[in-house]
Image (cartoon, rainbow, N blue to C red):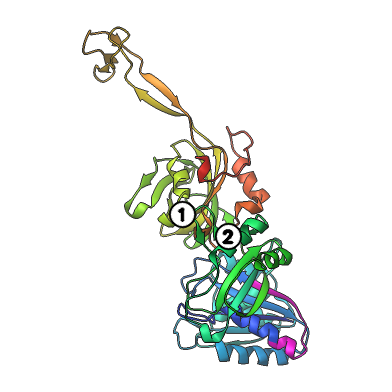
Amino acid sequence: MWIGIDDTDSPTGMCTTYIGAVLVRRLDERGMRVRDARLIRLNPNVIHKTRGNAAIAIEAEGDPETAFALTCACVEALAEFDDPRTNPGVVVARVRPPPDFYYAALREFCTVEEAVGVLESVGALYRGYKNRRGLIGATAAVASELPDLTYELLAYRRREVWGRPREVDRESLFYAEETTGPHTWDTVDQENAVVVGVPHTPDPVLFGIRGESPAWVREARSFVRSEEQACEQVYATNQGTDAHLVAGVIGALREGRSYLVRGTVASEPATGVGGHVSLLLADEGGEVRCMAYEPTKGFRDVVRALVPGDVVVAAGSYKGGSLNLEKLGIACLADAVRVRPPVCPACERRMTSAGTGKGYKCRVCGERSREPEVEHLERPLRPGWYEVPSTARRHLARPLVRGVPAWEDELLSSGQGCDRVNKTNFTKEDL
């Protein structure tokens, strides 16, 4: 059977993954063997999400009626029911729903009624609390398929210290990633010297470690020094897979979806108030504004180094008329030139314009020239992929240490006038 839980937390407390970890132990105590535990991230642009829009799915052996009662009791004891934004959902299905609903919840928007229709079609047991919105995520979680997957180890705090500052040794986190990377990632942000894997919200999570296998996240965890924990759980997950991205065409982008689009830079990048960087990207369908916000730190230097004519592939969420960048692939670099009046051969002083269409004239000796001085500038960028730092990475975004999916590289390398791309990944230090 498959058990799904969603929407049990709030911005002020609890975590659906913690309830999943507690349920795994209660199922085991009742003699129900847990075969798989999944942490499933859904559309990051959903306005009703409490924090990270994560749902939990557990595959177990046992009686569905007993498991349903146990899951409901667990949710009723631990969920943040007092928060108006918390609307839990519980699902237990003997027959797994088709994955279509998972992909819809991952990349689009779904309704409670659609979730109920899917659950009824497979004869699932389900219960929605309050407005029942949690049934959407719980259904998507049990319907999930993971052709690409990663793992996350989550350590949880003892209840008596919830709300207090976390005690996790900073240096041990950096050492853990240095020792196990690139097989683990996003425990820390090396470039900006920031800890990433320890949350600041008042929930039960102590720290998290993401990696390519259960063995690697456990290896990294062995180096971490922290306060005494209550328990820990390793989840298989769609985090770090780019599963939320679909190929898009500028001019046909829809609000709240996440895309990979190819286009030509159509404006000089501009730095606005707060340090946010914007530029226009164009294709045959029109133009779209791309945004690199201040939290993306050094990634903005990549965006600032682009010039009109560069051909790029931009990944991000389309919200409010802008594509908010998660990573950027450079397919072709345009020639960057500086055009200036020529230097007078006689006076060795720079000429000035003689008027529109009249060339240039030396104000000292009267020497004239029709041709400007054209200087070809060396570009600090190279073709390939660039990403935001760990501190700004979304849960679903695939870090470059995992490589780039074939379909994304094909989009980067397609089109006229571009050679096959050098697939080296670059960082701020390469600029």
Q: Amino acid at mark 1?
A: Thr
Mark 1 vs mark 2, foreground winner is 2
Quarter assignment of residue 412? top right
Quarter assignment of residue 267? top left
Q: Residue at x 69, y 61 (%)?
A: 212
Position in image of residue 40 (x %, y %): 62, 70
Identify the element where label 2 is drawn.
helix
Marking on residue 79: none
Identify the element where label 1 is drawn.
helix
Q: Quadrant of the N terminus?
A: bottom right
Q: Is residue 114 visible?
A: no
Q: Residue 106: within the magenta?
A: no
Position in image of residue 338 (x %, y %): 39, 26
| Mark 1 Cα-neighbour bin, 10 Å: few <14, some 14–19, many ≥20 | many
Residue 22 vs residue 200, the one in the foreground: 200
Residue at which label 1 appears: 296
Q: So how many labels did they put on this image?
A: 2
Q: Tell whether 183 sits left or right of 45.
A: right
Position in image of residue 23 (x %, y %): 66, 85
167 is higher (above) or lower (below) than 265: below
Which residues are the magenta region? 26-39
Position in image of residue 32 (x %, y %): 77, 86
Quarter assignment of residue 58? bottom right
Q: Is residue 221 visible?
A: yes
Q: Residue at x 29, y 7 (%)?
A: 346
382 is higher (above) or lower (below) than 172: above
Report how far apart the C-alphas of labels 1 and 2 lie in the structure: 20 Å
Q: Amino acid at mark 2?
A: Phe
Mark 1 and mark 2 lie on one chain; the one further toward the N terminus is: 2
Q: Residue at x 53, y 69 (%)?
A: 198
Residue at which label 2 appears: 174
368 is higher (above) or lower (below) than 234: above
